[in-house]
Structure formats: structure tokens, C-alpha cells
Image: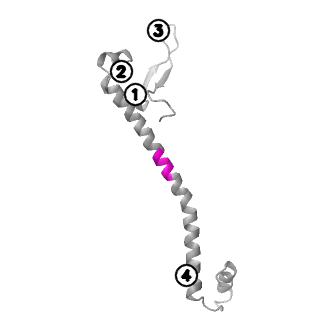
Amino acid sequence: MFTPANEANAFAYGARMAPLSTVEVEAEARRLRAVAVAQLAPKALEGIKALFGKLNSWRAEQKAIDELYGLDDAMLRDIGLTRSQIPAAVAGSIYRPALASNENATVTAEVVRLVPRHAA
């Protein structure tokens, strides 16, 4: 049977060991394959979870885009958007002042995101 000690001895003593039989080689190959699959399975599961998370996020954003495109121009104007700004607003890349922009107010920029953080 193959063990790390046998391998070390084979290199240290010029391979004076008896050669492994076909059955031993096949058994070791099966064991190594099982170890590789066992290590790969959790990583594959994490990848699938990440894929579904991104898919759900994309679907939420598409739903928000569809709802905004369903509004008429007056409603969009009321919330401060034009039709060309809808994808950027849903993606969260439209910056608006947090406070009134007059000489007495301190203006800070913040991202306006039209999809809740938990949905994206």
C-alpha cells in the first residue's frame, strides 16, 4: 500500500521496494479522486450560491427599471429623474446634494439608490 513513508523510503534507498500492484495503484487513484471531489464540492456550492445571489440582484434591478419606465414623464420629473437617468439611478450612480443648495447650507453629495440594499 502507498504511504508517505513508503514514498520517502523509495527515494532514499533507490527504490528497493517491491513495485505496487495494479490493484494498489487503482485503490490509491480512487482515494485521491475522492479527496479531490470532497475538496471541490464546497467551492462549487459557494459558486452556485454567488451566482444565484447575483441573479436575484439583477432581477430586482430589472424590476425597478421596468417600474420606473412605466411612470409618465411628470412623475419622473417629480422624483427628479429623466428617462435617460433611470438605469444610472437604479445602479446607484446618481449623486444629489443631501441639503438645500443655498449659501447657508453645507452641501454634501450622497448616492441616491432606488433599489433597497437588501434586494441588490
Q: Secondary structure at mark 1?
A: helix
Distance from the alpha carbon under mark 1 to that under mark 2: 8 Å
Label 4 – label 2 distance at C-alpha = 67 Å
Task: Report how far apart the C-alphas of labels 3 and 1 lie in the structure.
Answer: 24 Å
Residue indicated by mark 4: 26
Residue in view at x 39 percent, y 30 percent: 64
Q: Which residue is mark 1?
A: 89
Q: Which mark, by number, is residue 81?
A: 2
Q: Are marks 3 and 1 in contact (CB under 8 Å)?
A: no
| Residue 24, x across and y down, in percent | 59, 84
Amino acid type, residue under disc 2 in the picture: Leu
> Which residue is under mark 3?
102
Please state the horizontal and vertical placement of residue 108, each as a whole percent of the image: 51, 19
Characterize the magenta stretch by its predominant secondary structure.
helix
Q: Secondary structure at mark 2?
A: loop
Residue at the image position 40 percent from the left and 38 percent from the top: 59
Q: Which mark is residue 20?
A: none
Characterize the local packing of mark 4: few (<14), some (14-19) or many (20 or more) Cα atoms within 10 angstroms. Answer: few
